[in-house]
Image (tube, helix red, strand yellow):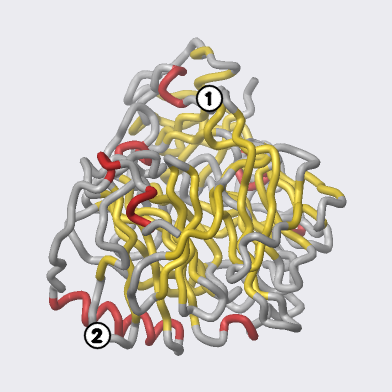
């Protein structure tokens, strides 16, 4: 077999370097283990270009890792800069599976070092261990759509140590390469079917059911079948229980250092109580701060509450002067952890109750507006809300609790529909507007739409204008 480096185009191997470890990384390792209570390893891609490759389609990327116990801090797991894709921890935490994009090829490397081993062609999307035997399987997408580099026609799997033994997993619908995750028993997965449809899949190749529209789906790595979808504002997850109960929203933009800005790359770790994200995304690139990237984008590890209704604690994993993307994390013992039977809020959105019991007509003085981009700047989205900040002047009816005079609120307005700007926007600052609003949480069907919010007032309640 050829050396792994020989499979990379020559232009992609552009840097070998020594990596210094700032002192702050030592404290990060201890904070990580304080959060998880166990040995933890995190892997991610780092942009060594201009910091804007948040979708990791270029060739200026490094595979990075951090171990909570080896005292090495952040370090490259591979010596070459190249066009890597989606590093994934193996279930035992001892190896990392990653892909090259051009040519499409899957590799595995030991966490402790050494040369990577080429496995087979394709793009790896998941790594799973069979509960009874412990055999580790790699799942890969194949047959790319010539018109869409993110869409593929099938998913296959193979044992990590016998890549020549291959099985078809899925070809009933097209899928996108971000994101595919499996239940612990391997019989269920969630994925884009394809984007923007998000659904659960019964494997192998049996059936699927769409449960939402959006992006970055993820499935809890136990057998609860709890799944999420990432919303169009890039700040929240909407949880969908397998029992068909109502969904609920979990904010993931509240970590210290994120401070309400957009986040990206949300993914469950191997432990159902923890997730990883990247952020904050502060640099606007059209209407999408994700595309702006930037050196301030770091990896964060979060801990869910026991009822899965909130992220209660966060730790910033990376501290560097590069942009960090596509994280995955392994937590020792995560493969034995399970969510409790009773999860969800038991009230609020899941029970059909929100801060407003129905539509309320109100008047508000406009204080601040989000910019309205050209429709081409939000592609592939074709619809968008822009969030405006108002001070309540008056509210009709006795059911207007929470809309006291003088209170500030956020209201989302449709500003782009079917790829065209709507008339009437932008509005005039200082002017009073009359509108009918509802709690945005009453409309989970809109959570997949692009929501443009430029202001930092993430602690204000969000409503939607339904005046028509």
Q: Quadrant of residue 373?
A: top left
Quadrant of the image for the N terminus? bottom left
Q: Is residue 400 above or below residue 75?
A: above
- Mark 2 or mark 1, which is nearer the start of the sequence? 2
Across and down, in percent, residue 408 comes to 41, 44
For this orientation, the residue located farthest to the front is 1
Q: Which residue is mark 2?
A: 71
Residue at the spot 43% in from the left edge and 74% down from the top edge: 313
Residue at the spot 43% in from the left edge and 87% down from the top edge: 39
Which dot, 1 or 2, sits closer to the camera? 2
User: SS at mark 1?
Assistant: strand
Q: Which residue is mark 1?
A: 434
Counting labels gives 2
Residue 333 visible, this angle: yes
Pick the front one: 424 or 17: 17
User: SS at mark 2?
Assistant: loop
Disc 1/disc 2 C-alpha distance (Å): 59 Å
Q: Name the disc covering residue 27, or none.
A: none
Pick the front one: 82 or 373: 82
Across and down, in percent, residue 244 comes to 83, 58
Q: Residues within 10 Å of mark 2 (few under 14, many from 20)?
A: some
Residue 443 visible, this angle: no
Residue at the spot 57% in from the left edge and 45% down from the top edge: 177
Across and down, in percent, residue 324 comes to 31, 55
Q: Is residue 260 above or below residue 19?
A: above
Q: Quadrant of residue 113?
A: bottom left
**Left or right placement of residue 273 versus residue 373 in this view:** right
Quadrant of the image for the C terminus? top right
Mark 1 in CB contact with mark 2 (< 8 angstroms): no
Pick the front one: 468 or 376: 376
Q: Residues within 10 Å of mark 1 (few under 14, many from 20)?
A: some
């Amino acid at each position: 077999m050829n050396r792994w480096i020989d499979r990379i185009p020559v232009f992609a191997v552009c840097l070998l370097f020594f990596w210094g470890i700032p002192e702050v990384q030592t404290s990060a390792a201890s904070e990580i283990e304080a959060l998880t209570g166990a040995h933890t390893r995190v892997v991610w891609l780092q942009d060594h270009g201009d910091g804007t490759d948040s979708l990791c389609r270029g060739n200026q990327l490094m595979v990075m890792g951090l171990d909570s116990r080896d005292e090495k801090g952040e370090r490259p797991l591979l010596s070459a800069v190249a066009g890597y894709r989606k590093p994934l921890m193996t279930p035992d935490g001892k190896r990392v599976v990653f892909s090259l994009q051009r040519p499409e090829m899957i590799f595995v490397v030991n966490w402790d070092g050494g040369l990577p081993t080429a496995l087979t062609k394709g793009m790896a999307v998941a790594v799973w261990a069979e509960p009874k035997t412990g055999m580790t399987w790699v799942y890969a997408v194949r047959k790319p759509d010539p018109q869409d580099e993110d869409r593929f026609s099938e998913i296959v799997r193979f044992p990590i140590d016998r890549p020549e033994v291959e099985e078809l997993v899925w070809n009933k619908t097209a899928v996108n390469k971000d994101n595919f995750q499996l239940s612990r028993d391997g019989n269920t997965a969630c994925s884009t079917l394809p984007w923007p449809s998000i659904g659960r899949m019964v494997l192998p190749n049996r059936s699927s059911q769409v449960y939402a529209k959006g992006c970055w789906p993820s499935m809890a790595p136990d057998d609860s079948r709890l799944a999420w979808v990432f919303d169009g504002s890039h700040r929240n997850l909407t949880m969908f229980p397998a029992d068909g109960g109502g969904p609920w929203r979990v904010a993931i933009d509240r970590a210290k250092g994120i401070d309400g800005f957009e986040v990206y790359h949300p993914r469950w770790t191997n432990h159902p109580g923890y997730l990883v994200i990247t952020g904050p995304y502060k640099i606007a690139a059209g209407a999408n701060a994700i595309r702006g990237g930037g050196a301030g984008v770091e990896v964060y590890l979060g801990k869910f509450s026991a009822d899965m209704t909130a992220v209660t604690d966060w730790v910033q994993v990376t501290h560097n002067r590069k942009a960090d993307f596509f994280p995955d994390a392994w937590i020792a013992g995560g493969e034995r952890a399970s969510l409790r039977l009773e999860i969800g809020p038991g009230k609020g959105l899941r029970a059909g109750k929100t801060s407003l019991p129905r539509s309320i007509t109100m008047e508000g003085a406009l204080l601040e507006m989000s910019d309205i981009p050209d429709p081409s700047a939000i592609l592939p989205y074709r619809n968008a809300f822009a969030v405006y900040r108002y001070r309540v002047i008056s509210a009709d009816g006795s059911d207007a609790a929470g809309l006291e005079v003088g209170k500030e609120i956020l209201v989302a307005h449709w500003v782009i529909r079917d790829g065209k700007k709507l008339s009437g926007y932008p509005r005039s600052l200082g002017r009073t507007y009359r509108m009918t609003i509802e709690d945005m949480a009453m409309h989970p069907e809109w959570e997949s739409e692009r929501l443009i919010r430029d202001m930092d007032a993430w602690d204000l309640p969000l409503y939607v204008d339904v005046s028509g």
